[in-house]
Amino acid sequence: GDSVTQMEGPVTLSEEAFLTINCTYTATGYPSLFWYVQYPGEGLQLLLKATKADDKGSNKGFEATYRKETTSFHLEKGSVQVSDSAVYFCALSSGNTPLVFGKGTRLSVIA
Amino acid sequence: DAGVIQSPRHEVTEMGQEVTLRCKPISGHNSLFWYRQTMMRGLELLIYFNNNVPIDDSGMPEDRFSAKMPNASFSTLKIQPSEPRDSAVYFCASSLTGLDQPQHFGDGTRLSIL
C-alpha cells in the first residue's frame, strides 16, 4: 500500500540556517503530496502541496518539489526562524484513499 | 471564518467511564476524519465520513470506540468503557469531498484516562 517515509528527528538548527527535511513515498498511480505543520498544542495545518510531477509547492518561505523520478518531496527553507519550531509531516493521497502521513519530524530552532 | 471546532480541549476521567468527544466541521465540508495521536504510534486515522456516512472505520481500535455523524455540522467519538491506554490527543479534521483534498484540523482533545 501507499506509504511515506520522512527523516527521523529531532532536527536542531540555529536561526537563519538552511533546512531540509527529507520525504520519500511509495504509491500507486500519481498521488498528491502535502506538507503539514503542527505547532505546540495545535492541530496540523496545511503548509504546502503539489499535485503533479515537477510542481513546486511553496508557502511562508518553505518549498518542496514533486520529484517523480526519485519519488521524493523534500521540504526546504533557506533561513529558519525560531517561530518555525514545530513538527512537520509529509503526506500523500492517491485520490481513492485517505491521506497517508509520515511519522513527523520535530524541528527546533535556537536563537 | 471558523475552523474545525472540537470540545472539550482537555478531558481527565477515571478508567471505566464513558468519554464523548465532539467535533463541528467547517461549513460546506463533506468529509470528516477522526485521528488519534500518541508518541508511540504517531497519527492514526480512526474513521472517516463522507456526507455523514461512515466510509471506513478499520482504524477504530476496538468495539469500545464508536463514532457518529448525525448531521453535516456535528460528529461525536465515544469511548465506553475508557481505559488508560486510550490516553492520547484526538483530532477531528474536515475537507471538501475528495480524499486528495487538504484536510483542516481542529486543535484536538487531550484525553487522560486515570
Image (cartoon, coloured by chain):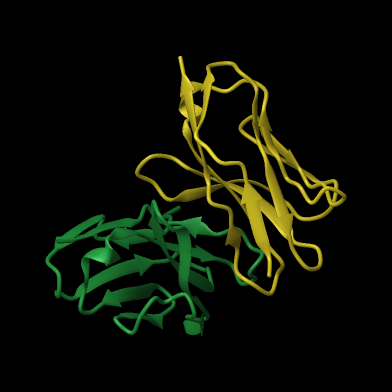
Chain colours: A yellow, B green
Q: Is residue A92 shown to the viewer in this render?
A: no
Say which residue appears at 68% left-offset and 32% top-offset.
A76
Residue drawn at the location 34% of the way across and 44% of the way down: A41
Identify whether A71 is placed above or below A13. below
Percent across and percent down for residue A80 are 57, 23
Residue found at x 29% / y 81%: B64
Quadrant location of the C terminus of chain A?
top left
User: Residue B39: horizontal and vertical position, in percent?
Assistant: 39, 51
Residue B68 in which image quadrant: bottom left
Q: How many labels does the image show?
A: 0
User: In which quarter of the view is residue A32 placed?
Assistant: bottom right
Front-most of residues A25 and A16: A25
Q: Quadrant of the N terminus of chain A?
A: bottom right
Give the quadrant of residue A39: top left
Please indicate, yes or no, whether residue A43 appears anywhere in the rendered image.
yes
Of all residues, the one furthest to the right in this rendering is A69
Answer left or right for B87 relative to B51.
left
Position of residue A23 measured from the top left corner of the image (x, y, whole percent): 68, 45
| Rendered location of residue B16, percent (x, y) | 14, 75
A45 up-or-down from A11: above or below: below
Q: Is residue A45 left or right of residue B98?
A: left
In the rendered image, the vertical position of residue B111 relative to residue B63, given as above or below: above
* B25, A100: nearer the viewer: A100
